[in-house]
Amino acid sequence: MKLDGKVALVTGAGGGIGKSIVSLFINEGANVFAVDISEDGLKGLSSLLQTKSLYTLRVDITDAAQVKSIFEQIEGNFGRLDILVNNAGITRDKLIIRMSEEDWDVVLNVNLRAAFILAREAAKMMIRSKGGKIINISSVIAFMGGVGQANYASSKSGLLGLTRALAKELATRNIQVNAILPGYISTPMTDALKEDIKKEYLAKIPLGRFGTPEDVAKAALFLASQDSDYITGNFLFVDGGLSF
C-alpha cells in the first residue's frame, strides 16, 4: 500500500472529488481526517467508509480558530501530519458587472485564504516531523479563465502562486508542495451546469470524455506517495487535454 500508516487531512471531503480522494487514501493504508462544512456530506462519507482509519470533522475552514482545532485533534491522535490536500472549493458565478464584493470575498475566503491557513498549520507539524506533502486542488480555469468566473479563476490562480512559493520555502524541510488542475470533472457541482455549456466543454476535450473524481484521486495519490518525492512546485493537469 502506497500510504501505509500515513496521516492525511483532506478538506472538502464531502464532495465528489473529496470523497474519492478519502476513499483511495484509506484503501492505500492512510489514516484520514476528512473535513467538510456539510454535515450531510460527512455522514454520507462515514456510511460509505466504515473504518477506524476515518475521522470526520465538521469545520468551517474560513475560521482560523476552527482550523487550529483540526490540527489539535491530529496532534492528539497521531502527533504528526504527513499529507494535506486542500480540496475545498466553491463557486459563485456572475458576470463582473453584477458581481458583488461579497461574491468575490466568499469565494476567495474558501478557495484561497483557507488554503493558506491550512498550509501554514500543516507546515508547522510537517517541519517538526521532518517532511510531508501538500497538495492544492486548483483548476484549469486558473489558466483558461471563464465567463462569469472572475472570483473563481482568481482564487484558483492564487493557489498556484501559493504552491510555487511554498514549494521553494519548504523544500529544505523535505516538504513537497504541488497542485492538481482538474478540467471538467463530473461532480454534483459541475453537473448543475446547463446542458449547452456541458456540450461546449465536451467538444473541446481531446480525449472525448469528462473526467471522474477517481481520475483526480489517482493524481492526488501519486503526489501524496513516495513516487513523487523528487517533484515539487509542479502543476499536474487532469483535464483530458482541455487546457491546450
Image (cartoon, rainbow, N blue to C red):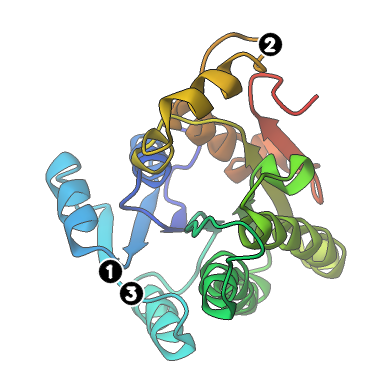
- Locate the C terminus by quadrant: top right
Q: Nearer the viewer, residue 190 or 98?
A: 98
Instruction: Measure how far apart labels 1 and 3 are at the Cα level.
Output: 6 Å
Q: Position of residue 129 (x, y in %)?
A: 61, 70
| Residues tagged 1 and 3 counted as in contact (Cβ below 8 A) | yes
Q: Residue at x 59, y 33 (%)?
A: 219
Which comes sooner in the sequence, label 1 or label 2? Answer: 1
Q: Position of residue 27 (x, y in %)?
A: 34, 35
Instruction: Measure how far apart labels 2 and 3 are at the Cα level.
Output: 38 Å
Q: Position of residue 58 (x, y in %)?
A: 27, 70
- Relative to 15, say whether 40 is above or below: below
Q: Nearer the viewer, residue 90 or 148?
A: 148
Task: Using the rendered view, name the quadrant where residue 151 is placed.
Answer: bottom right
Q: Nearer the viewer, residue 209 or 6?
A: 209
The residue mark sitting in front, 1 or 3, is: 3
Amino acid type, residue under disc 3 in the picture: Val
Amino acid type, residue under disc 2 in the picture: Pro
Amino acid type, residue under disc 1 in the picture: Leu
Task: Using the rendered view, name the quadrant where residue 169 is placed.
Answer: bottom right
**Which label number is shown at residue 206?**
2
Q: Residue at x 31, y 68 (%)?
A: 37
- Badge 2: residue crowd in 10 Å (few <14, some 14–19, many ≥20): few
